Image (cartoon, rainbow, N blue to C red):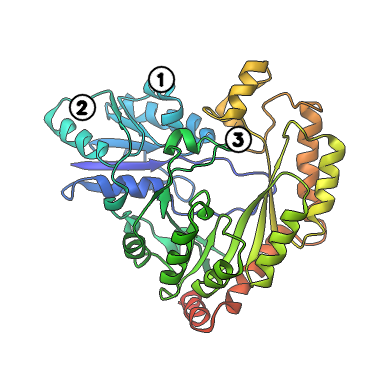
Amino acid sequence: MKVLLVFPAWPKLEGQTRFDLPPLGVLQVAACLPDDVEVSLCDENVGPLDLRADCDLVGISIMLSCQAPRAYEIAAAFREQGKPVVLGGLHVSLCPEEAASHADCVVLGEAEGLVEQLVADFRAGHMLPVYRQEGFPDIENLPLPRRELCNKQRDYTYKGWELVDLVETSRGCRFNCYPCCTPYLGGRVHRIKPAERVLLDIARCGERLFIVDNSLEQNVEYEKELFRRLADCGRAFVSHPITCEPEVLDLARKAGCWYVYHAIYTISDKIRDRIRMYHDHGIAVEGTVLLGMDEHTPDFIERLIDFLLTVDLDLAEFTVLTPFPHTRAREQMEREGRLLDRGWQSYDAGTVVFQPRQMSPDELQALYFKAWERFYAEETQTLRMTRLFLRLSDLPAGLARRTRSAARG
């Protein structure tokens, strides 16, 4: 049996440095397939899709809502040839009825356990139209992602540097942030993978990692344990925020913490102090800056941009509030009649699709572009990104030698 897994192309933010990362979700799905299944992967973001590929079953993973239009085009092309198509991924779980209208089968929720049953049913000739996860799979015994399906050196590099592998150490989030759908998709319980399983996965990764958990700060003791264990792995890693306490930051730096993403949507001394603490421990910071919250006025956004230019961010990525399904933001927008665009191609986090509270949509869109222009007026994003890669040489001595050696190789 031959299975083709497809990760559809998706539009990048205008002004953002273009690079692509190996898609973790589809690699995790591949790990759920039985050993006797011949599996191939096409990431359309780095290579063309062969719509005449020799396969028995096509699986399409829709991580982002803005991928959905292209995913549905691909599904239609294969189904016209009589090839059965399965759709899964975050967007499918958010919009199951819509997705089901474009596929022979949809997988809803986390894939482990469902994919195995789907394949067995397909082989028996009675694949169901819907496979729905009831609850969550056992986090302690998940299969390891099929990382060998990606050619890192060929497809996932930036100016000669091999890019990060995405690594998951937990699922779910106990927070319930206004623009986020993670609580709906992954639950409000922070489900932690055993450190031993995480290290087994990391051993199969390259020299640079991105720990994709929403927040490592959800469990400080696990955070410390993970960093202690990572210190022996010789990897550099990126993550979302880590706890700003000296002990944790010391452990993170020794473990190879390269830089962190830090959400910013307001002006505060707390943010300024956190950035300073990260920098004091040799950890760089990329601000992920959200524009268009209800309290944002045009004057405030101008002042927020000024603030960002004073806090010594290494990089900044600007987005506009996007009301994705099953978020508190979308519930409010629906209730107040403020949704202006329901086409998923516009849900790229850079296009205004709603009526802002304190300005027109065109004003917010213009301020979004202005933020990119002003922040990178003196140094381009490419220059700042290159400088960030050069900081790898400042990591602890043994780790730095390994990362430089990997770069040359």
Of the pair 154 and 206, the residue shown nearer to us: 206
Query: In the figure, 286 relative to 258: above or below?
Result: above
Q: In the displayed orientation, state which residue is furthest to the left.
A: 124
Q: How many labels does the image show?
A: 3
Residue type highlighted by circle 1: Glu
Q: What element carries label 2?
A: loop
Q: Identify residue for label 1.
A: 97
Tell which circle, 3 or 1, labels the residue nearer the N-terminal end. 1
User: In this rendering, is residue 48 above or below 287?
Assistant: above
Please state the horizontal and vertical placement of residue 132, each as a whole percent of the image: 31, 29
Residue 317 locus on image (x, y percent): 67, 50
Left/right placement of residue 133 relative to residue 186 reads left
> Pointer 2: what residue?
127
Circle 3 residue? 179
Residue type at mark 3 is: Pro
Q: Residue furthest right?
A: 299
Quadrant of the rendered image containing residue 82: top left
Tell me which residue sits at (78%, 46%) in the image.
371
* Position of residue 74 in the picture relative to residue 319 (left or right): left
Q: Nearer the viewer, residue 248 or 74?
A: 248
State the SS at label 1: helix
Residue drawn at x 43%, y 49% as measured from the top left: 23
User: What is the crowding at mark 2: few (fewer than 14 residues within 10 Å), some, or many (at least 20)?
Assistant: some
Figure check: 256 above or below 15 = below
Foreground residue, 114 or 152?
Answer: 114
